[in-house]
Amino acid sequence: MPQNASSVEHQAARVQKLKASKLKERFSALSFELSAYSLWAMDWNY
């Protein structure tokens, strides 16, 4: 029984890690898009 519980905890930790990495990926992509857009906007202003 304790082994099973630890396995469930391990699974949950893995899911959390996966979610975090996915979120980080999305965030970096978003920040890249934002920086590209701001560069484009600055270019447009000049």
Image (cartoon, rainbow, N blue to C red):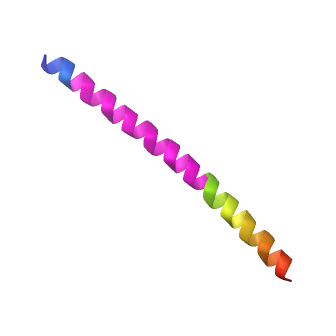
Q: Residue at x 39, y 33 (%)?
A: 15
14 inside magenta stretch: yes
In the rendered image, which quarter contains the C terminus? bottom right
Query: In the picture shown, does residue 27 fall above or below 12?
Result: below
**Magenta stretch bounds:** 6-28
Residue 10 x, y percent position in the rendering: 29, 29
In the rendered image, which quarter contains the N terminus? top left
Q: Along the horizontal axis of the image, is 43 left or right of 31?
A: right
Query: In the picture shown, does residue 20 fall above or below 14?
Result: below
Q: Residue at x 32, y 35 (%)?
A: 13
Residue 33 x, y percent position in the rendering: 69, 59
Residue 30 x, y percent position in the rendering: 62, 56
Q: Along the horizontal axis of the image, is 34 left or right of 19?
A: right
18 inside magenta stretch: yes
Q: Residue at x 63, y 52 (%)?
A: 29
Query: In the picture shown, does residue 44 fall above or below 8?
Result: below
In this rendered view, identify the residue nearer to me: 42 or 6: 42
Residue at the limit of the structure toward the left, as seen here: 1
Residue 4 x, y percent position in the rendering: 20, 18
